[in-house]
Amino acid sequence: MTQYLLQQIVNGLTLGSLYALVAIGFSLIYGIVRLVNFAHGDLVMIGAFTALGLVASNLLPWPLLVLLVLLTGFLAGAAIERVAFHSIRNAPMVTGFIVTLSVSVAIQNAALLILGGQPRNFVFPALFRERLDIGPVNVAVIDLVIPVVALLLAGLVLLFVLRSRLGKAMRAVSENTLAAQLMGININRAVMLAFGLGGGLAAVAGLFWGGKYGQIDPLMGFIPGLKAFIATVIGGVGSIPGALLGGYILGLAEVLFVGLLPSEYAGYRDAFVFGLLILVLLVKPNGLLGVDEGERA
Amino acid sequence: MLQLEDIELFRGPNHVLKSLSLAVQPGEIVTLIGANGAGKSSTLLMLSGLLPIRAGQARFSGGGQTLDLRRSKPEAIVRAGLVQCPEGRQVFGRLSVAENLALGAYLQKDKAQLRRSLEQVYGLFDILYERRQQKAGSLSGGEQMMLALGRALMAQPHMLLLDEPSLGLAPKIVEQIFELIAQLNQEQGMSILLVEQNAMLALELASRAYVIEQGRIVQQGDSRTLLTDSRIQEAYLGVIG
């Protein structure tokens, strides 16, 4: 039983890492433009297909592959901001919401058109599929790589936002756009940077998602997007540590729910996830690590 | 130094500035006084490049260069030395005092210059040095005002735009702030455009003044003359004639 539980915890951490990578982007973007970006999940799909192309060529060492996927996600995220969201920056929240949904539908349909609806097999190199015995637990290499890379990237992004000049500028914009402009901070650049960073992390999540589940398709971004959004809200929208925490809580809770309860409950997985969200919001309306908007002055 | 001619400005459908002309000479303190909604803050936001000018001429010269404000981005305006300390202080409450000050010098990449600016600001405000690690949101109103001023000074301005520095502060703090503004002007020759609702204070500090009503300059001249003007006294100084 302990062995089974440990196994499930490893699975939960892997899934949680993927949610966390996507959730950080939601938080970054919301923090800076107060926009819940429903097209964010589609960056997962873009990352997965980019990775598919790169894996197929079979020439690149994998750290370089991760880097290239990250870069593609960064550029795609920044480009989507520029094309779709730039002009509605000061529009009411509802407009933003509708536009991000439309962008999501547009991206998915463009992908369907170009790539076709047929799911593609996504096979990671044999190295990642090898299984290791660590104590009582038997895990695939990929299940270890995912949390390590996710935490590394999350740590780098956090460090960047807290310490670097541009990161501080991003936080300044997120807190007070007017004052930031009066310091000579270029708002457009800060906003594009947030979308880019979010896009890069989501794309890496897509690469791992494909590697872990073995299949990708143009609509694959919807579920991770939605789950990561829930993780963001659980952790506290606008907080990067909150997004990480929310991602891991959701990943673990979901896996343990399915793994520990009798199998006839497995179908209620999503109901359980939403139930968890409602429960957290009842107790902590701003999420676990969220900042009260009223205190932001 | 600053030259505005026949400026027309709209905010949405509202015509907020109507043929506004105004000038500030180097080393001068000029004040723009007027009631709520007369267009004072809009004027300053426009000068910082945050509101588009519909018509008219707007030029700023500082540090040996001249800038057409109609075609300049906010960052170019700050870089040229026209720096604003906004209404309501607008400090970054979740960032530390030191981080706030560093952001004030965001465009300054010369580390040595940055250190000099920081020393200068800490020299002017001991309290900011004492609280440098503290979150700006935890400071008192007066301390936040000092931080906002210090943050603006970090950009090494040739000309400072001050929007309602007295707003919501105790009289004693206001006195301190105004003394400091006078000191910056006298010792460093910094030009200042001061927007104030407290007309008495503003007129006592400034050498010249403009009175704005509904987007138009209705009166201008020497501060001392305006202080004794019966119409100004009635409308802005609370003297019943």
Image (spheres, grey):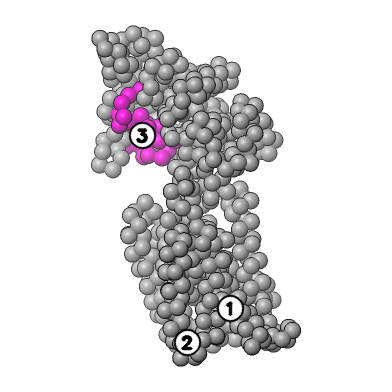
Q: Quadrant of residue B58?
A: top left
* Total count of labels: 3
| Above or below for A235 versus A276 | above
Q: Quadrant of the C terminus of chain B?
A: top left
Whether pointer 1 and pointer 2 mark residues with C-beta atoms closer than 8 Å, the reply is no
Could you say whether the residue bearing mark 3 is in a helix, strand or loop?
helix
Label 3 marks a residue whose chain is B
Labels 1, 3: one chain: no
The residue at which mark 1 appears reads as A12
Query: What type is the residue that disc 3 sits on?
Result: Ser
Q: Position of residue A177 (x, y in %)?
A: 46, 46
Task: Look at the image and give the residue range highlighted in magenta.
Answer: B33-55
Query: What type is the residue that disc 2 sits on?
Result: Ala
Calculate the distance from the C-alpha at mark 2 to the C-alpha at mark 3: 60 Å
Determine if the magenta segment contains residue B39. Answer: yes
Between label 1 and label 3, give the one nearer the viewer. 1
Labels 2, 3: one chain: no
Q: Left or right of B10: which side holds A218?
A: right
Q: Residues within 10 Å of mark 3 (few under 14, many from 20)?
A: some
Q: Residue at x 37, y 51 (%)?
A: A90
Q: Position of residue A126 (x, y in %)?
A: 68, 87
The residue at which mark 2 appears reads as A266
Determine if the magenta segment contains residue B3. Answer: no
Q: Residue at x 36, y 11 (%)?
A: B227
The residue at which mark 3 appears reads as B42
Q: Nearer the viewer, residue A27 or A74?
A: A27
Q: Nearer the viewer, residue A90 or B137?
A: B137
